[in-house]
Image: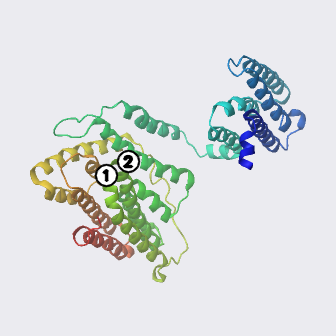
Amino acid sequence: MLTELLHRVPVDIVNFILVTLFSLLIGLEQRRHHIKAEFETLFGTDRTFTLIGILGYILYVIEPNSLMLFAGGGLAIIVLLAVYYQAKIKTDKKFGITSLIIALITYCLAPLIYTQPAWLVLLIVVSVLLITEMKDTLFEFSKKFDDNEFVTLAKFLVIAGVILPLLPDKAISAEINISPYKFWLAIVAVSGISYFSYLIKRFVFPNAGIILTGILGGLYSSTATTFILARKSKEMPDEAKVTSAVILATSMMFLRVFLLALFFNKTIAYKLAPSFALFIVVSVLIALYFMKSPKLVNRQGKELKISNFQSNPLEFKTAFVFGVLFIFFAIITEYVTKNFGEGGIKKLSFIVGVTDIDPFIINLFQGKRNIEISTLVTAVLIAITSNNLLKMIYGIMLCNKKIRWQLITGFGILIMLGLMVVYVFPLW
């Protein structure tokens, strides 16, 4: 019954109510935002903004086709706002125009409601309310930026939004079955994950402790994070947290590789999912054991903060090295596939584990070779297990002597689990 009544209400009435409500809501927010300001110094609040919205509605519905009246009304409001702004500068020495812009947006609500989907109108209104209320928050957030932050953002936008679309998606040659587009897409994907990790560390957790450093660092590079934490362990009294952070960095490596697989080859990603889920659960349990074990509790109550573990995620030197390795592994993988078959790929994956595994596994995800999916999954798991062996060796060589057996135990479990998943109980 109620639904039928609502359908019988003219659209113009419904739209008028929406314009009035949204304008009033914006006006009320303006009153709350300027609650401490003198009333005489304000351009307007709830009533003024509501009337501006209603004026826009009237002038729009009278002549919705040519919009001459609506444009004329908008021009008149702009003139009035300009006069007000000039007087504001002279009397109050204030130069902000936020309220004036919001008044113009309020005036435009009527054509928005008539011509655009409801979700877009709501999104605009909510955005206006949030941006107005977040003035102090945005000001504090801007203080966290240094001179290089926007340069870094600009770099990422250039490599992802400018260079990538311009590259051809045609194989470089018969020997290198990778197109320039896919080659650059791999750089964008890896840089994107690294940049995301950097932003979280830089702006959300700038003073992250050891555990969070391991987690965020693992998204960037678990090998580099293990290297750094192992060296820093000699300065840290909390042995358990160092080991836990290193193991958690490796757990994030599984997540990073899965995300890359999901991006480039969903079939392989779904095949890897059960194994990676097992690896992540086991690595988290190992980390929790070292953190909670009574024998490994920190007695000094101090924790060294590691800041700037990832100073610039988009260094061109890093991208260049990645590109060289990517092309190298594309050539060597193609050669091994043609001359040694699937057995050669598995042996190559073990050797690759002692280097940066991302270029190799992305080659496996992107390549159009006549190789069984199960073989590709096996190769990825072997490379990861080999890389865990490398990280264990790094840890043993560089860490505080007190945590060597912890690292051997933690990585030993993951390595044995990797071998079992590959050779004894495959999960795909």
Query: What amino acid is labelled 2 in the image?
Result: Val
Which amino acid, by three-letter code, is at mark 1? Asp
Quadrant of the frame with the C terminus: bottom left
Residue at horizontal 25%, vertical 70%?
Answer: 419
Q: Quadrant of residue 273?
A: bottom left
Residue beneath the point at 79% across and 37% down: 20
Helix, strand, or loop for circle 1?
helix
**Mark 2 vs mark 1: which is more N-terminal?**
2
The circle on residue 89 is none
Residue toward you, 247 or 112: 112
Where is residue 27 shown, x and y percent of the image? Answer: 80, 39
Side of 147 relative to 395 (left or right): right
Whether residue 132 is visible here, answered yes or no, is no
The circle on residue 358 is 1
The residue sitting at 25% across, 51% down in the picture is 364
Q: Residues within 10 Å of mark 2 (few under 14, many from 20)?
A: many
From the top left corner, tell me how far across and down residue 92 is, in percent: 84, 30
Is 375 rendered above or below residue 81? below
Residue denoted by label 2: 190
Whole-Å distance between the Cαs marked 2 and 1? 8 Å
217 up-or-down from 182: above or below: below
